[in-house]
Image (tube, rainbow, N blue to C red):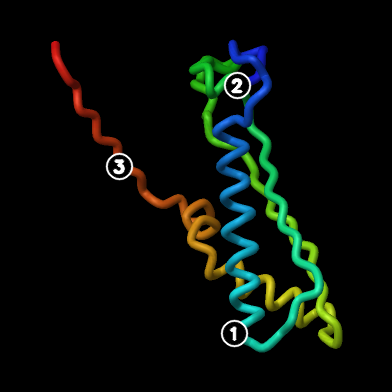
Amino acid sequence: MPAALGGNGQDVTPGWLHRAGLASCTATAIAMTAAAEGIALDTLEVRASSRSDTRGLLGMQDASGDLVDAAPFDVTVSVRIAARGVDAEQLRALAARGCACSPIQRAAACATPLALTVDVIGS
């Protein structure tokens, strides 16, 4: 975690790993879609970014007394793509089809229900 949150600031955060997984899964899905359609990609770069309010992670309240949500308030996946002989609109559509097949992206976009189980050991 960053030094401001009590960490040493030298390692990646869980949020960074989440975004890296999102970008990696999306890139894989786009590449698989391109291969299935016989399109040889020259460039494929995927980046994921998000913005959040750190107060949510700390369980803090906003000025009105409401608990600040710990979830990011936005997530952006940016794709840079190129393939010789394929026009821009075809590549945009290809990227969109690939994104629709990315399990991590779909889980994030669809707010997949999450179940929490807790095993308390010893009392």
Q: Marks 2 and 3, how far apart in space?
A: 25 Å
Q: In which quadrant of the rendered view does residue 42 lie?
A: bottom right
Q: Residue 111 location, x and y as percent?
A: 46, 50
Q: Residue 43 location, x and y as percent?
A: 80, 68
Disc 1 secondary structure class: helix
- Placement of the C terminus among the 4 image quadrants: top left
Height in image: 19 above or below 80?
Answer: above
**Earlier residue among tags 2 and 1:** 2
Q: In which quadrant of the rendered view does residue 81 lie?
A: bottom right
Near-viewer residue (16 or 88)? 16
Q: Marks 1 and 3, how far apart in space?
A: 35 Å
What residue is disc 3 on?
A: 115
Residue kind at label 3, given as amino acid type: Ala
- Please rate how many residues cluster around mark 1, counting C-alpha atoms within 10 Å: few if below 14, some from 14 to 19, many from 20: few
Identity of the residue drawn at 84% across and 83% down:
87
Residue 83's disc number: none
What residue is disc 1 on?
A: 36
Q: Marks 2 and 1, how far apart in space?
A: 40 Å
**Earlier residue among tags 1 and 3:** 1
Residue kind at label 2, given as amino acid type: Met
What residue is disc 2 on?
A: 1
Disc 2 secondary structure class: loop
Q: Residue 80 location, x and y as percent?
A: 80, 63
